[in-house]
Structures are given as structure tokens and as C-alpha cells.
Image: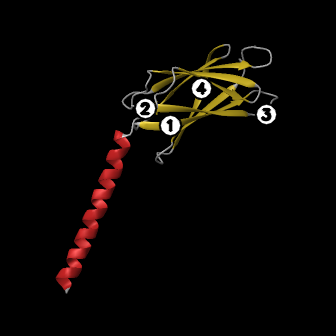
Amino acid sequence: MKRRQLLIVILGIGFLIVVTFLGTSLEALIPRKPTAPVQVAQAGPYQVTLQVSPNPPSINQPANLSLQIVKKASGQLVSNARVILASSMQSMDMGTEEIVARSQSPGLYQAQAHLSMGGSWQLHVQITVPGSPAATTNFDITTQ
């Protein structure tokens, strides 16, 4: 009787190991939607354009993120904004990395993100201009 119970426990543990292995293997085999070379999104009164370099981003090096922020109504570049980026993996909790983008020229902000695992990531962008409420938008990035 004890041998039978031991066999059931060993088979159960083996089954869990196989299911875990298959789940992580299938994640790697599922084709991923590539990151668009240029993405445009609306964040309140602003139009935000994102370019990622290298594209697709690699897990071995930081991704360079360039954001152009324009007031949609006037087409004027936004030069006095505080831009905070938060990257988080969509399929697994890898934590959230917050990055403050630096202004490079009027309307152009740059940052580097460490996307440490292959898969789909969401980049949350928060734009704060003095005297205006914060505006947010999201972009999807796929790493290889």
C-alpha cells in the first residue's frame, strides 16, 4: 500500500515538472508580433511618437527609446515636459522599471530600458507639463 502511495506521489511530481517545462517551452515557440519601427499614440492633448533601437530590442543590451512629443492641436513641439516611462512584461511579473527620459532637443526625449526577457512588454508613458494635468499612453514592445 505504501509503495502505491509513493508511486502516485512520484508520478504527480513528474507530471508537474513536465507541465511546467511544456508551458515555458511553448512560450518560446509562439510567434511574437514584431515591434513596429515607429509607433504613434495619443496622450491627452499630445501626440507621442516612439522609436525603439535596436529593433527588435535585444535582451542582452538596453533598448534606446526616442520619444517625440507634439501638442496635437498646434503641432508645436513640447520642450518643458517631465517624461516618465515604466516598462513591464505582459506575460510574467518581472517587476516594473521606471525611467525618467531626458530632453535631447525641443520635443525629443530619450531613455534606455533594460527589457531583460524575451516577449511582450508594455511601455507606459506619463507626460507632465507645468500647469497641465498629467497625460498617459501605452506602447507595446516585443523583445527577442
Sequence-wise, which precedes: disc 1 or disc 3? 1
The amino acid marked with disc number 4 is Ala
Describe residue 119's horizontal placement relative to residue 76 as left or right. left
Q: Nearer the viewer, mark 2 or mark 3?
A: 2
The amino acid marked with disc number 2 is Thr
Q: Quadrant of the N terminus?
A: bottom left
Q: Which mark is residue 109?
A: none
Describe residue 44's horizontal placement relative to residue 113 as left or right. right
Which residue position is annotated with label 2?
143
Q: CA distance from mark 2 to mark 3?
A: 32 Å
Q: Residue at x 79, y 33 (%)?
A: 133
Please tell me whether residue 54 is drawn above or below residue 105 in the rendered image.
below
Q: CA distance from mark 4 to mark 3?
A: 18 Å
The amino acid marked with disc number 3 is Pro
Q: Nearer the viewer, mark 4 or mark 3?
A: 3
Q: CA distance from mark 1 to mark 4?
A: 18 Å
- The image position of residue 77, as x and y in percent, is 72, 14
